Each structure stands twice: as structure tokens, then as C-alpha cells.
Amino acid sequence: MQSTSVPPSSERLHGLDAVRAIALLLGLVVHASMSWLPGAQYFWLTHDATPHAWAGLAFYVPHMFRMLLFFLLAGFFARMAHQRLGTRAFIRDRWKRIGMPLLSGWFPMLMAILAVAAWNAWLVNHGKMPEAPPTPPLSPRHFPLTHLWFLYVLLLCYIAVLLVRAVLGRSALAQRAIDAGVRLFASPAGPLLLAIPLGAALATHARWFAWFGIPTPDQSLYPSLAAWIAFGSAFSLGWLLHRQPRLLQGWAARWPLHLAIAILATIGCMLHVGLAPNLVPAPRDMTTFAYAVGYAIAGWSWSFCLVGLGLRFLSGHSRVRRYLADASYWIYFVHLPVVMALQVAMSRVQWPWFVEFLVVLVVSMALLLASYDLLVRNSFIGVWLNGRRKPRGLEHR
């Protein structure tokens, strides 16, 4: 049985690394499922001729928690890096590994996605390009960040936490109060306490499509209040947990409790909204508020559970897990046009939906892993994303 202790910050946290990779790689599952969701033609690039409500499970459940979990761990690892580097070097490091990839990669990713969209439109219209739909002019309110929105929000989180840290300074009173609050939020009651403000923000969000959960800021430079509360609170909790890492041992011990709550809350939410997407905005009433709080409880309980499971069972060294953890950033960064192109290809065949879905997952993962190993791992791109060049394959220096 693996130890649940959290090692010093100078050591690699294999369990948390593995869980962060899982959070990113689940993005492939979520996005790959969308072509088979009923009504996909209204919100996705392509829709398959054989949609199935059960494809909703592959989207709905991971989507409840994967970005909450990612930002929670991003905050934890960010403070670890800040403690190791100091403020100035931390800012340079975050700019190199988060800001520069966003600045240099956003436009190529957008062009690749548009190219796939054009290919799909050409196929659907039997070899003729239809007239392009009208689009609003580029502005802060209409800015297609695509799936790279998470890098933009990470930069905002870094700025916010450094500003708060500068304002509070080294106030012993503030530190004691914050540490006491974190102990409360890390307790068994934490998912409920964290869910109440998020649930309120979701329930009052303008035109909230409840089935799709937390509205991600992928089309605007202005994150909504719900997105700020969700991802900002996750990042902040992770940052502050690094001050008291032994609190995570409680999550490792209580993972069955959090798993049970997560499953029950997820089932309750799905009984309310169903397996297929609901494209009607939720009414602003107490039923919506109850659903929103339940959804947030499920998301936070899944996050606590998976962190605990990672520390409990994945804390030992594994070359395969470490390789996937290193590769996960690149895979998520470039996966979307690859997944979309394979979805377009699958829309031209008449196979069972789950076979097409598995083909998209397996082929995209194989292509992305190959591109990482051949083009990224031992190149300047790998230095950008992972901090240093790494040897090819599963071997480590």
C-alpha cells in the first residue's frame, strides 16, 4: 500500500502529478464525446448520424470536476514553484510556460480549428463551400480563446494571488485566519461550503444552460462571475493548501466518503437534467438553485476524492505515469483540432456510436503521444511547457 504522506516541496509529488494529468486528459474524453451528443449540431462543429444519450455520460460526469480539479492542483503547484523560485523568477517562469504558449499557440490553434470546420462544411455540402456565417468583430467581449481559455484564466489567477499576497504582506493575523479557513474548507464539510457560493453564481448566471455546468470563458476575455468563483476558488484553495499540505492526508483517508457523496450527487443531478443536453436556459428558481448546489457538491467531492486517491495509490514512482504527466500539457494544448478532424472522419461512416467514439479516442491519443515524443519532449517546445528538455521515451535522467 502506498504512503499517504505529502513529501517536501523539493520532491516530485507523483500522486498529484498523476491526478493533474488525469484532469487534462479527461478533456479528450469530454471533447471527443460531443459529436455523439443529441442536438450536437447546435453547439459543436460536427454531429454524427448516430447520436446516443449514453454519450452524455462521457461528457457530463468528467465535465463536473475536471477543471475544478485542474485549477486546484495548479494553485498547489504554483505556490510550490513560488516558494522555490521567489516572486521575480516565478513571474518569468509562468510567463515562459503559460503566457508564451498562449500568445504563440492561440492563433495556430484557432486556424487549425477553422480549417477543420471548413473541411466539414465542404463535406456536408457535397464538395461546395457554403457562405460563411456572420461573426461579431473581434473584441474583449467576443474573443475566441477556444480550449486555451484555461491558460488565460491561469494568468489571471497568478496576477490575483500575487496582488493579494503583496497587500496582505506578512501579517501574522491574516495568515492565522487564512490557515483556519483552509482547515475548514479542507474538512469533510468542505465540498458543501465551497458549493454554496458556486451554486448561487450558477443559478443566477444569465442564460445558464444547466446541463453544461460551469460556463467556461472560451469566447470572451471577461470571465463570468460563476467562472471566477469556480476556478478562482479552486486555484486559491490549492495555493493555500500548500501552506498546510498535511491536510491532504485527510483527503487520502476520506476518499471513500467523498466518492460516495460524489456518486450520489451526480446521480441526483442526472435524474434532474437527464442524459441528453438540454438547450433551454434554466429558470431562476429554487429548483435551479438546488440543482446548482448539488452540481457544485458533486464537482468538489469528485475533486477531493481524486486527490485523495492519487495520494493513496499513485504516490510511488512510475515511468509510465510520469511520462504521461509530462505529456499531458502538450496533449491538451493541441488535441482539439485533432479530435475534431477525427470526428469529421467518423461522421462519414456508419459504425455504432461507441465504436466511432473509441476510434477517435485511441487514434487521437496515439497521434498526440507520437507528436509529443518526436517533436516536443526533447525540443525547445518541451523547455517552454515542462521547464527543461527531457530524454525521448520513458527514460529519465
Image (cartoon, helix red, strand yellow):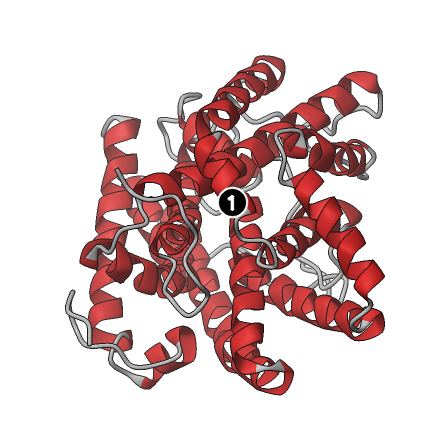
Residue at screen point 65% across, 51% down: 237
Q: Quadrant of the C terminus?
A: bottom left
Q: Amino acid at mark 1?
A: Leu
- How far across and how far down the image is residue 353, in percent? 30, 28
> Of 308 and 235, which appears nearest the observer?
308
Splitting the image into 4 quarters, where does residue 13 fall? bottom left
Q: Which residue is mark 1?
A: 248
Residue 227 seen anywhere in this rendered image of the structure: no
Residue at screen point 66% across, 34% down: 190
Q: Quadrant of the N terminus?
A: top left
> Of 98 and 86, which appears nearest the observer?
86
> Of 146 and 198, which appears nearest the observer?
198
Residue 367 seen anywhere in this rendered image of the structure: yes
Left or right side of 297 for 385: left
Residue at screen point 48% across, 62% down: 114
> Of 53 and 86, which appears nearest the observer?
86
- How far across and how far down the image is residue 318, in percent? 21, 55
- How far across and how far down the image is residue 69, in percent? 53, 46
Q: Residues within 10 Å of mark 1 (few under 14, many from 20)?
A: many
- How far across and how far down the image is residue 47, in percent? 43, 37
Splitting the image into 4 quarters, where does residue 383 fall? bottom left
Residue at screen point 44% across, 37% down: 252
Left or right side of 2 for 289: right
Give the SS element for disc 1: helix
